[in-house]
Image (spheres, rainbow, N blue to C red):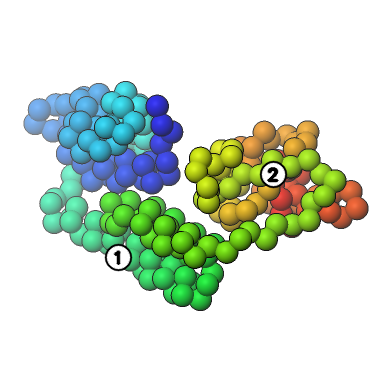
Amino acid sequence: MNTLSRADRVTIAHVCQDWAAIYYGGPMNLSASDAIRYLADGHLEALTAQHGRDTIWRAVAAHLDAHPDTLTTSRTTQAQREQRQADRNTRAAAYLDAARDHHRRELPYEALALIDRAEVCSPSFKDFDHYRAIVHHKFPPPTLADLRGTELRHRRTLPLISPAPTAPVRYHGAREQQWVYPGRHVINGPWPAPTPEQCTEVEKDGLWLEDGTALVCAGCGLDMT
């Protein structure tokens, strides 16, 4: 079973936002579990095929549990849903335009970050992996910090090889979920959080390792140099 990506979760959120209130209650007096079934089976077929029905049902249920007002808000019309999607596509297109500009200026990491943001705005708008492949085609060799004498495990946010050597760092912080640029290291150590994604010390000052070899997050060991 594959783990749901951030784009997958956004797709589920959009479907719930657009359709949950239509199925819940109403003339047929549908229950929340009925709404979950209609949402998962009727609007998320691609994700169900990729991840399995049980996974998507649980993800929809979890989203509705976290956002119960989604079930009871005013029902949307077809025109409203089309306008919402148009607005999402517009935001995604703006990020893609910015990504193209950064790609032309040979700023690949920034271009990839903008492509990610575009995908989160509207996951169904384009084939975003196609745009990533274009950027990776001209990707320069990575320039890494000199961290000799430290114990490292190198995790890539956007792997340049397949399969990736380790799981990617998706973000930094359990609540803020701050963006992590590709090429960042995580330094093994007795940190409070086992991974950057679970770190709760995002806002604190970094910690310089002995001899000033690297500045790391004191909560998880993420290289901040």
* x and y percentages locating residue 190 in the rendered image: 78, 33
Mark on residue 90? 1
Q: Residues within 10 Å of mark 1 (few under 14, many from 20)?
A: some
In the depicted view, which residue is nearer to us: 7 or 68? 7
Q: Which SS class for mark 2? A: strand
* x and y percentages locating residue 82 in the rendered image: 18, 56
Label 1 is placed on what type of residue?
Answer: Thr
Quarter of the picture holding the N terminus: top left
Residue furthest right in the image: 211
Of the two numbered discs 1 and 2 on the same chain, state the one appearing first in sequence.
1
Left or right of 95, for residue 143: right
Q: Which residue is mark 2?
A: 186
Kindly indicate the quadrant of the structure image that contains residue 188: top right
Q: Is residue 65 visible?
A: no
Residue at figure coordinates x 75%, y 49% from the top left: 216
Q: Is residue 101 visible?
A: yes
In the depicted view, which residue is nearer to us: 8 or 87? 8
Q: Give how far apart the Cα atoms at labels 1 and 2 are.
A: 36 Å
Residue at figure coordinates x 54%, y 42% from the top left: 164
Left or right of 153, for residue 181: left
